[in-house]
Amino acid sequence: MGASFFAGIALFELQRRYQVAQKIQILFWPLLAAMIVLFFYPRPVGLPIELAWIGVISPLLVLTGLTVKVAGATRQICLTAGILSYPIYVLQYPIFCWINGIFQTILHSRSPAIEVPLIFVSICALSAAAAFWLDNPIRGALTGFRPSAETKLKDTQGSSPIAGQP
């Protein structure tokens, strides 16, 4: 996990300094196709292909993805999904464990028909709460930006993954 964080910082710096994404943007669709093939391939693909995914395909897909332009409602959905992605990543396992544990303690059984929707709604709601009441204010305090209620879901600057930040 630590390597992914530093790889992300390296990609950010590479793009910031050299504008690499614009130079390789033609690779976006082939890389996206490669990702789909890898994700839906019915058998294990082997270590060399997994390493190629981790070290080459995935980072290049992230870089070339920077050049894709979306507008309108799709843009707002993408911005909101981007804001919620990290809280969902962080909270999904603890929320699952708590809800599953409480459910089994109270009812002494498992019922996916009840647990799955309950877990899904809880993860979405608690991740949104964490993003807007914890993550955004903390990031704002650290960067000197304080989002108002109107800018939390609006992209006022047009370029930031965090709504309203320059």
Image (tube, rainbow, N blue to C red):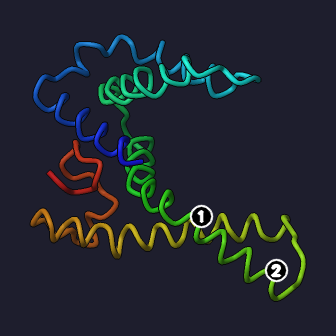
Q: Amino acid at mark 2?
A: Gln
Q: Which mark is residue 103?
A: none
Image check: 162 left or right of 103? left
User: Could you tell which of marks 2 and 1 lies nearer the N-terminus?
Assistant: 1
- The residue depicted at 78 percent of the width and 70 percent of the height is 115
Residue 64 occupies quadrant: top left
In depth, the one of 129 and 61 nearer the eye is 61
Q: Mark 2 to mark 1: distance in Å? A: 16 Å
How many numbered markers are drawn?
A: 2
Q: Residue extending furthest bottom?
A: 106
In depth, the one of 45 and 153 nearer the eye is 45
Q: Is residue 133 above or below residue 163?
A: below
Residue count near mark 1 (Cα–Cα under 10 Å), binned few <14, some 14–19, many ≥20: few
Residue 116 occupies quadrant: bottom right
**Residue 146 location in percent, x, y?**
16, 70
- The residue depicted at 52 percent of the width and 66 percent of the height is 91
Residue count near mark 2 (Cα–Cα under 10 Å), binned few <14, some 14–19, many ≥20: some
- The residue depicted at 69 percent of the width and 26 percent of the height is 40
Image check: 21 left or right of 32? left
Residue 150 occupies quadrant: bottom left
In depth, the one of 38 and 51 nearer the eye is 51
Q: Which mark is residue 93?
A: 1
**Residue 139 location in percent, x, y?**
22, 65
Q: Amino acid at mark 1?
A: Tyr
**Which residue carries the number 2 mark?**
104
Image check: 101 left or right of 60? right
Q: Is residue 130 above or below residue 25?
A: below
